[in-house]
Amino acid sequence: QVQLVESGGGLVQAGGSLRLSCAASGRTFSSYAMGWFPQAPGKEREFVAVISRTGGNTYYADSVKGRFTISRDNAKDTVYLQMNSLKPEDTAVYYCATDRGFSYYNGSTYIGMDYWGKGTLVTVSS
């Protein structure tokens, strides 16, 4: 059974930084893509960053390019999201996700994630 556990959320002032972590278990971590998908209050969950199984390819939403960096440590079965220059509009519950091997980037968003964590709350104050 695939399990994803997020950590690292919290309250930060605008312009600050946070690093989220997601620890995975239940299967071979290095065989699957991993990503982060925040859901702001009253809005649908959206794509912000995905990393391929080897880490060789990364994909970002335009809203976070240059501010967020996704990375993974396959030896620790963990994926990270370094968030810099945070804005109040980044406030959301951030969900970690992974696929079954068939997800893809369609040029604007990422499709096909199958497993989700419970999320970690990020609050950015102005």
Image (cartoon, rainbow, N blue to C red):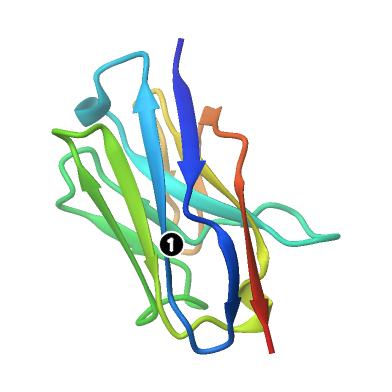
Task: Please name whichever residue, 78 or 33, is drawn nearer the observer in this view of the structure.
Answer: 78
Residue at x 86% of width, y 60% of height: 42
Asked if residue 109 lies left or right of residue 56, the reply is right
Q: Quadrant of the C terminus?
A: bottom right
Q: Quadrant of residue 123?
A: bottom right
Asked if residue 85 lies left or right of residue 94, the reply is left
For the view shown, which residue lies furthest in the top direction? 1
Where disc 1 sits, the SS reads loop
| Residue 121, percent from left and from top | 64, 55
Q: Amino acid at mark 1?
A: Gly
Residue at x 45% of width, y 54% of height: 106
In the rendered view, tell whether residue 60 sits above or below residue 2.
below
For the view shown, which residue lies furthest in the right direction? 42
| Residue 60, percent from left and from top | 40, 66
In the rendered view, tell whether residue 94 sits above or below residue 119.
below
| Residue 77, percent from left and from top | 25, 32
In the rendered view, tell whether residue 84 sits above or below residue 26.
below
Q: How many residues crowd mark 1 within 10 Å: few (<14), some (14–19), many (20+)?
A: few
> Which residue is under mark 1?
107
Residue at x 50% of width, y 89% of height: 15
| Residue 22, percent from left and from top | 41, 41
Residue at x 32% of width, y 45% of height: 79
